Amino acid sequence: MGIETIIAPLLRGLTFNGNFGRLIKFNSSENPAGRTFNIPAEIKSQTSDSEIKDIMVSAFNSYVDVNETYPETAVLEGVGTFTIVEKNNSPKHIDSVSPSVSGSTLASSVKGKISVVTGGAQGFGEGIVRQLAASGSLVFIADRNLKGAEVLASRLNKEIGYRASIAVEVDVTNEYSVRKMVNTIVLEAGGIDIFISNAGVLKAGSVKEMSLSDFNFVTSVDYTGFFICTKLVSPVMALQNSVSGNYFTDIIQINSKSGLTGSNKNGAYSGAKFGGIGLTQSFALELVTDNIKVNSICPGNFLDGPLWSDPDQGLFIQYLKAGKVPGAKNLDDVRKHYENMVPMKRGCTSLDVIKAVYYIVDQKYETGQAIPVTGGQIMLH
């Protein structure tokens, strides 16, 4: 991690307004514009984040005391320039999102914040991305499918009227890839306020027949990927909070109802999701000292998304072939079976999930929780 990836979150923390910090964009050239804060050169010889923070806080606060305003740029000689963006744009109405959700009081809790959604190019992830962008958050669409993320970002930015989303490539099972993603986001925007660990895969099958490679594949994405992302995102969030001690941020895992109750012939997925809740509770206990809240959302079945409806690899076809639904003769039989298991007689949607996201971000007194969004199919007791 270069010193610029430490300075950027500190600058975001130094400009904290009680809800979020200003956007910070790094450029390796030294081209200051407007009011300029010269970062003390001695900072480059420091070896710890705390030493860098102490120098930054003292020098920055001195600048503000003298000038009675924030700088527009910050320059570190031999490193580059940090542009400090005063305010974010406000979204216009988008036909593709629900105005009743994006315009709600809870939705305002994400306005001006920097969000990241892994697996954001499709399915639940795409729905979450759309709602966050519509509510005024700058959203990084993180996905292995970079082309899909770029197409979605381009479409959203055109609909909204400004750069509300940015595509970034990531493989959540690869620590180097996740580190590269985090650094890219920090240098582009200054930090991370909301990280949604949504990337997930599923391979159904009997424990008697499932290959170890399939089991490991599911576990590496759904369980280990959450660990890797939290490991590399939380230090950035901690830096933002270190200045004021009052900068709350959120790590949210999109878990599953299968993380709350076992799933027949679906042990790899259910086991990984149960493990994800264990990580959620453990991370929450550790990271609360940095004002990082860690929670899980456990949705019901997203029957209209690609995870279920893909004609070749979707769960409808997997479950039909695996014989998971007794007597099912076609895909419609499988779908009807799962709809009938829900008291509200329908699958979960991204709008259902985003409301839980808004609640978690808005609620400062909630961490380590697994929140079911299942239409009554799973009830906590």
Image (cartoon, helix red, strand yellow):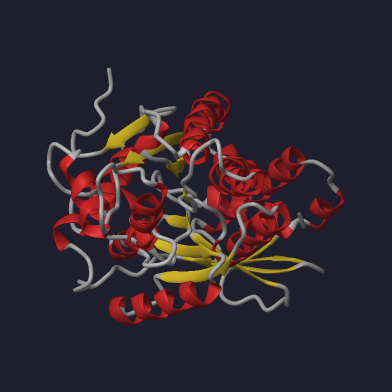
Report whether 216 appears left or right of 50. left
In the rendered image, which quarter is residue 369 located in? Answer: top left
On screen, residue 91 above or below 265: below
- Residue 351 seen: yes
Q: Is residue 246 visible?
A: no
Q: Is residue 127 left or right of residue 243?
A: left
Q: Residue at x 53, y 45 (%)?
A: 222
Residue sitting nearer the eye, 374 or 227: 374
Q: Residue furthest top?
A: 381
* Total count of labels: 0
Q: Position of residue 43 (x, y in %)?
A: 79, 51
Residue 85 rendering spot, x and y as whole percentages? 48, 67
Above or below, 224 against 42 in this view is above
Closer to the camera in the image, 102 or 41: 102
In the rendered image, the residue lying farthest to the right is 45
Residue 42: x and y in percent read: 83, 52
At horizontal 29% and vertical 68% (from top left) the residue drawn is 90
The residue drawn where x is 83% and y is 54% is: 44
| Quadrant of residue 18 within the rendered picture | top left
Towards the viewer: 130 or 310: 310
Q: For the point 45% across and 51% down, which residue is it?
A: 198
Image quadrant containing the N terminus: bottom right
Q: Check the picture and name the quadrant holding the C terminus.
A: top left
**x and y, in percent, of residue 156 in the image:** 35, 75
